[in-house]
């Protein structure tokens, strides 16, 4: 899976319950945890092994989650091996979910496969649940009301203009996700948006790349793309735009400081989050002629 593998594994580790709901898991999840470290052959681990306690059950159930950027029939061998490893270690056949991110040609992943021994004495058939994200309506993910599924939305079947969808992704992450997870969720959403559209203009709806570069996941992604001249030029342009906006914000804060004293920290934070250069310039003009800080705040709310 390359760079998408890292981002997918982060989502499994941090929001594994959301992925299971995306896969159609019915029933209340009382608790869950990533349990990969308990399997004795780490080099052959599935992308995600989750231990999930469901309401009404005495013991937690093992769930295997396999993520694929594109459909690839080699996954069958992996799924058989995953199931055998977990069964051998736990004595319980795991539930298996395969999530395919993006289509490729006419290849599809079948929901089951049968194996036979060389002499035919032994047969083994395993089935699993397959979710092909491009076939999932975006409304199904929004209905889950879980910030952990938002990064998958750009890969779904979209019923609206992509820019409107991505704007909603950003707003929901900023309003519904825990503050400590917002940067990473935005970063992963950006990466999956690139997989779907391969167009930097869509990334702007999720914030500037340089804003999210603090996230380790996005840092690795940016490094992997630096050989692309077009990407480098776009990144440089976004960085210059960020410097321009930072300079305007600095001028704005200086005007407010000169007229009304040091601006409150909440106001500074609010101004630093504004990404529209035209809006910032209009606020500079407003700061130079408003009667007091309350009047400026009122103008800010209307902008």
Image (spheres, rainbow, N blue to C red):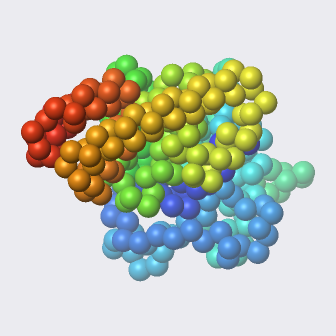
Please say if 93 is above or below 264: below
Q: Is residue 128 visible?
A: no
Please say if 247 is above or below 268: above
In the rendered image, the residue lying farthest to the bottom is: 58
Residue 198's x, y, as percent?
60, 23
Residue 201's x, y, as percent?
51, 22
Quadrant of residue 137 within the rendered picture: top left
Q: Is residue 52 visible?
A: yes
Specify the quadrant that holds the C terminus. Answer: top left
Point 22% across, 33% down: residue:
288
Asked whether 252 or 157 is in front, the reply is 252
Specify the quadrant that holds the N terminus. Answer: top right
Residue 79's x, y, as percent?
70, 52
Please say if 71 is above or below 81: above
Asked whether 81 or 48 is in front, the reply is 48
Point 42% across, 30% down: residue:
205
Point 19% across, 49% down: residue:
260
Asked whether 206 or 108 is in front, the reply is 206
Q: Is residue 271 left or right of residue 227?
A: left
Please say if 246 is above or below 173: above
């Amino acid at each position: 899976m390359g760079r998408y593998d890292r981002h997918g594994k982060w989502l499994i580790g941090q929001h594994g319950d959301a992925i299971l709901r995306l896969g159609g898991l019915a029933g209340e999840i009382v608790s869950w945890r990533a349990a990969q470290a308990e399997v004795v052959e780490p080099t052959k681990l599935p992308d995600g092994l989750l231990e999930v306690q469901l309401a009404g059950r005495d013991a937690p159930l093992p769930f295997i989650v396999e993520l694929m950027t594109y459909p690839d029939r080699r996954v069958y061998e992996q799924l058989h091996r995953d199931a055998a490893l977990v069964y051998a270690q736990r004595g319980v056949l795991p539930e298996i979910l395969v999530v395919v991110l993006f289509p490729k040609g006419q290849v599809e992943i079948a929901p089951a496969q049968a194996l036979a021994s060389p002499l035919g004495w032994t047969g083994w058939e395993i089935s699993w649940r397959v979710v092909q994200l491009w076939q999932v309506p975006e409304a199904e993910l929004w209905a889950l009301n879980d910030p952990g599924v938002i990064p998958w939305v750009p890969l779904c079947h979209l019923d609206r203009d992509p820019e409107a969808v991505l704007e909603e992704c950003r707003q929901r992450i900023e309003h519904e996700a825990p503050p400590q997870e917002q940067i990473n969720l935005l970063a992963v959403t950006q990466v999956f948006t690139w997989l779907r559209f391969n167009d930097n203009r869509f990334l702007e709806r999720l914030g500037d790349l340089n804003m999210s570069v603090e996230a380790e996941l996005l840092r690795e992604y940016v490094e992997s793309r630096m050989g692309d001249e077009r990407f480098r030029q776009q990144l440089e342009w976004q960085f210059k735009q960020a410097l321009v906006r930072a300079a305007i914000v600095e001028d704005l804060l200086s005007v407010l400081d000169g007229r009304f004293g040091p601006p409150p920290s909440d106001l500074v934070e609010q101004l630093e989050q504004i990404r529209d250069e035209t809006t910032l310039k209009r606020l500079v003009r407003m700061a130079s002629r408003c009667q007091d800080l309350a009047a400026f705040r009122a103008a800010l709310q209307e902008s």
